[in-house]
Image: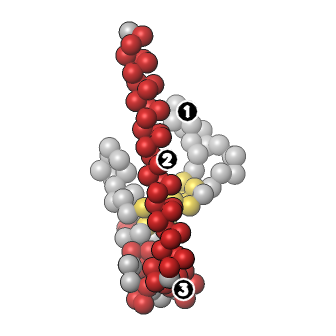
Amino acid sequence: MIWMTDAIHIPGTGRPLFPDGQPVVRLETVDSATGRRFSDRTEVILFNLRYKGNSKRGDLAHDFRETDPKKMKNPLLRELMQRVKYTEKGEMEMCELTRQIFQDGKTEGLQEGIQKGEIRSSR
């Protein structure tokens, strides 16, 4: 699983999430009570969107931050972004996706509110 983030610190610790500004951190699954590492072959990779190195990873982080497709370095990402931003079909797909995300959030929020209300009323 790959997570892309622009976070700087590990929440609640103030420690840097990406030591020495590195572009990638690999996480291991660890039992917090015993410190035992799990060997479930789960691999979690964090990708630093703030990374600005002169490398393929730096170029990728640049492209994910960039809003103008013409300034993107990766030809595939540039083409996809141009299609989404500058074609009617791409615009319609993004509008539909945005509507769906909004609706999902609304439904999730409503369900959470109902659950909290039920808990309060049972007290």
Residue at 70%, 46% (x, y): give it.
Answer: 40
- Label 3, secondary structure: give it: helix
Measuring 54% from the left and 85% from the top, which residue is drawn there? Answer: 79
The residue at which mark 3 appears reads as 79
Disc 3 crowd, CA 10 A, few/some/many (<14, 14-19, 20+): some
Quadrant location of residue 62? bottom left
Nearer to us of marks 1 and 3 is 3
Displayed quadrant of residue 36? top right
Q: Which mark is residue 45?
A: none
Question: Which SS class for mark 2?
Answer: helix
**Real-space CA distance between mark 1 and mark 3, rounded to the nearest whole angstrom:** 48 Å
- Residue 80 coordinates in the image, percent (x, y): 54, 80
Quadrant showing the C terminus: top left
Whether label 3 touches label 2, CB < 8 Å: no
Q: Which residue is mark 1?
A: 34
Residue 104 disc label: 2
What residue appears at the point 37 percent right and 16 percent down from the top-left corner? 120
Amino acid identity at mark 1: Thr
Taking the image as shown, residue 3 lies to the left or right of residue 14, namely right
- Secondary structure at badge 1 equals loop
Badge 2 density bin: few <14, some 14–19, many ≥20, Cα 10 Å: few
Which image quarter is the N terminus in?
bottom right
Q: Nearer the viewer, residue 54 or 60?
A: 60
Give residue 94's position: percent from left, percent from top: 49, 68
Residue 3 percent across, percent down from the top left: 51, 59
